[in-house]
């Protein structure tokens, strides 16, 4: 979602804010702006609709000031225009506010301000906050008290940063549902919605909790609750390095992150495979063997790609641990008044650890006494702090389209499945088989990546069509869903995924020479059945692309030897343990989507209308 950056310290802040905005631009990029406390008093505010480059061009040559706030926006209330861009100020220009999230009772607050004769300049919910804080910050009222008083009236979610021309030595920040991270530097402090904006300056960070405010000055910070009770917060060190946030010579983060998968998987598995007991060691999971034996069912929750990873994870858990397991979009789960089962294990899957729907689902389960594990990438993120769990260690993922984190989720859920299974019914020989399968993944993914040129050629042919289908069944189905998602989100080629056997119940009507069908065909006991399904596509002369393993490739060649091959294109990934096939089968689909986007001249890193880390409903 939107990105926030703030600075107070000994340096001129405009370049620091702009650099920080560039780092969080992936969270939102339809407009951007900044406010700086000018040395001679007053605030200077510059904001522009469009990409960050437009703001950059609009900045005055000299923009001095040692405290400031900045924002990159992904519009929720109001069009992306200059007026609606953040920061927003009150009528006198004293108070500037940047905000992520949504003020739900905005109509009531706007009406109140308008009744008081305040002329609102734009349509955003945030502007109200600036006017209300300015009204509350009368003589003798500390800025943090004014902010507290206003936030106490706000219904909805926020991460906010406030700058006051009358107190240019401080920022006041607060959070409720949208991340705010403090970065502790040398006689300077930063605030941001994402560590990406902080790592260049400091490794010492502290995350605000919901309902918490911080008063941030060059020399440090103090935190308090909305009712003014002081809270305590100890900064911790982040291990991500600045290089991980750079493109490192690649044209797009998406391709860089696809190519990083072997190392990401290695990190996800490091120290977690136990050969002696043929199981997984998961430091952050506190379930005892007795707890595991008591689990009657596993429910996985996530959104977007994390939900598809959860679907695949549920399959592995069910098949290895012989425990009923299923996955549901967290957004649906939280609103359907679900029954929370005491003997169920809930697993929240999230890259950012901040996705609001997933977070609220976690909180709802916990509130009703359920046990939740988090499978999360960002250390110290809200979901990670809410639950015990497994960190993915995939490193920062900048591209909106999730790639390396998706495969790390699959591997980590494989570890969790193995751990649960080895306490339950899985014997040591099968355990050892899965351990070896997991250990082989980084090298096998590297082998798939070697085939990039062939995949690019297929992608260019797919990009020539307006639509594509992805089909798969059982373990191939979540992969097909993820493949279709990747293609549509970065190339804008319309793509749908179906369980292979559902084609004949409707979608087959659309299959024609102009509709490529990508068939995900793991080499498992269903392979023969799946191969016969693809004949239905062949019969309608739909271009067929197989993403398969050696068995599928062999069947294609055998058919070719006696006449026509089964497919128009075959992309083959190495043989592996069947439970882990989704990891390998996903990689060609990521490259397919990426190269289709490039062929169509799309910006793969910043797909239209989408944002990473969605902290609104
Ligand atoms: C957004 C992103 C997706 C991501 C989803 C869940 O929609 O565009 O790539 O899968 O959020 O994000 P999370 O951080 O919870 O994994």
Image: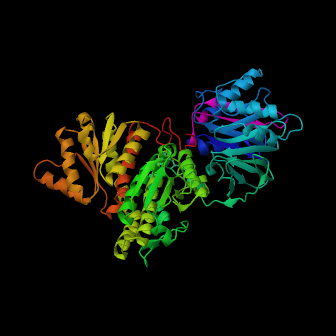
Residue lying at the far right of the rendered structure: 140
Q: Which residues are magenta?
A: 27-53
Q: Nearer the viewer, residue 576 or 115?
A: 115
Residue at (85% x, 35% y) in the render: 40
Relative to 291, 502 lies left or right: left
Q: Is residue 466 above or below residue 360?
A: above
Q: Give the colouring mode of the picture.
A: rainbow
- The location of residue 558, given as percent across then percent down, is 15, 56
- The location of residue 133, given as percent across then percent down, is 77, 34
Relative to 279, 476 lies left or right: left
Q: Nearer the viewer, residue 241 or 416?
A: 416
Residue at (37% x, 76% y) in the render: 428
Let me know if residue 576 appears in the view.
no
Q: Nearer the viewer, residue 322 or 568?
A: 322
Q: Quadrant of the C terminus?
A: top right
Determine the image quadrant of residue 232.
bottom right
- The location of residue 19, given as percent across then percent down, is 65, 44
Residue lying at the far left of the rendered structure: 562
Relative to 40, 499 lies left or right: left
Q: Is residue 47 above or below residue 451?
A: above
Let me know if residue 291 appears in the view.
yes
Residue lying at the far bottom of the rendered structure: 276
Q: Quadrant of the N terminus?
A: top right
Query: Is 155 colored magenta in this rendering?
Result: no
* Total residue callouts: 0
- The location of residue 35, given as percent across then percent down, is 73, 36
Determine the image quadrant of residue 551.
bottom left
Determine the image quadrant of residue 468.
top left
């Amino acid at each position: 979602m939107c990105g926030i950056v703030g600075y107070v310290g000994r340096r001129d802040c405009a370049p620091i804010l702009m650099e920080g905005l560039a780092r969080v631009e992936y969270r939102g990029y339809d407009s951007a702006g900044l406010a700086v406390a000018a040395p001679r008093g007053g605030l200077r505010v510059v904001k522009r609709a469009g990409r960050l480059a437009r703001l950059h061009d609009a900045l005055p040559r000299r923009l001095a000031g040692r405290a400031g706030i900045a924002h990159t926006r992904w519009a929720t209330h109001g069009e992306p225009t200059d007026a609606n861009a953040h920061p927003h100020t009150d009528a006198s220009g004293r108070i500037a506010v940047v905000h992520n999230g949504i003020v739900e009772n905005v109509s009531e607050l706007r009406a109140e301000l308008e009744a008081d004769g305040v002329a609102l300049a734009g349509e955003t919910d945030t502007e109200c906050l600036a006017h209300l804080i300015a009204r509350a910050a009368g003589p003798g009222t500390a800025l943090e008290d004014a902010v507290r008083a206003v936030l106490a009236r706000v219904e909805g979610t926020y991460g906010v940063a406030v700058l006051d021309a009358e107190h240019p030595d401080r920022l006041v920040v607060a959070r409720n549902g949208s991340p705010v991270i403090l970065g502790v530097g040398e006689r300077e402090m930063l605030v941001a919605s994402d560590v990406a904006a902080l790592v260049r300056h400091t490794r010492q960070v502290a995350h605000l909790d919901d309902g918490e405010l911080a008063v941030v000055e060059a020399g440090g910070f103090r935190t308090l609750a909305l009712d003014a009770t002081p809270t305590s917060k100890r900064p911790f060190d982040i291990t991500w390095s600045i290089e991980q946030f750079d493109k490192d010579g690649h044209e797009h983060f998406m391709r860089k992150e696809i190519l990083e998968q072997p190392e990401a998987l290695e990190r996800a598995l490091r120290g977690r495979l136990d050969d002696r007991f043929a199981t997984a060691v998961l430091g952050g999971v506190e379930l005892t063997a007795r707890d595991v034996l008591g689990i009657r069912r596993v429910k996985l929750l996530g959104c977007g790609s994390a939900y598809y990873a959860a679907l695949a994870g549920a399959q592995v858990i069910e098949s290895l641990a012989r425990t009923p397991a299923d996955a549901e979009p967290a957004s649906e789960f939280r609103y359907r008044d679900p029954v929370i089962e005491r003997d169920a294990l809930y697993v929240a899957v999230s890259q950012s650890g901040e996705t609001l729907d997933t977070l609220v689902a976690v909180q709802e389960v916990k509130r009703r006494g359920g046990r939740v594990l988090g499978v999360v990438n960002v250390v110290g993120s809200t979901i990670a702090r809410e639950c015990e769990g497994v960190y993915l260690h995939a490193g920062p993922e900048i591209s909106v389209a999730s790639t390396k984190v998706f495969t790390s989720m699959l591997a980590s859920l494989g570890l969790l499945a193995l751990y649960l299974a080895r306490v339950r019914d899985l014997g040591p020989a099968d355990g050892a088989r899965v351990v070896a399968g997991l250990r082989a993944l980084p090298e096998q993914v590297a082998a798939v990546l070697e085939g990039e040129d062939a995949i690019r050629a297929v992608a260019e042919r797919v990009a020539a069509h307006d639509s594509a289908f992805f089909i798969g069944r059982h373990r191939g189905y979540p992969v097909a869903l993820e493949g279709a998602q990747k293609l549509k989100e970065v190339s804008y080629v319309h793509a749908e995924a179906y369980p292979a056997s559902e084609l004949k119940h409707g979608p087959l009507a659309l299959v024609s020479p102009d509709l490529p069908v990508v068939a995900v065909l793991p080499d498992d006991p269903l392979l023969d059945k799946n191969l016969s399904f693809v004949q239905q596509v062949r019969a309608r002369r739909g271009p067929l692309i197989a993403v398969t393993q050696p068995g599928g490739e062999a069947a294609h060649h055998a058919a070719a030897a006696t006449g026509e091959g089964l497919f128009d294109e075959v992309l083959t990934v190495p043989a592996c343990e069947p439970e882990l096939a989704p990891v390998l089968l996903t990689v060609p689909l990521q490259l397919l989507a990426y190269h289709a986007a490039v062929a169509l001249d799309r910006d793969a890193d910043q797909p239209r209308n989408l944002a990473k880390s969605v902290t609104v409903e």
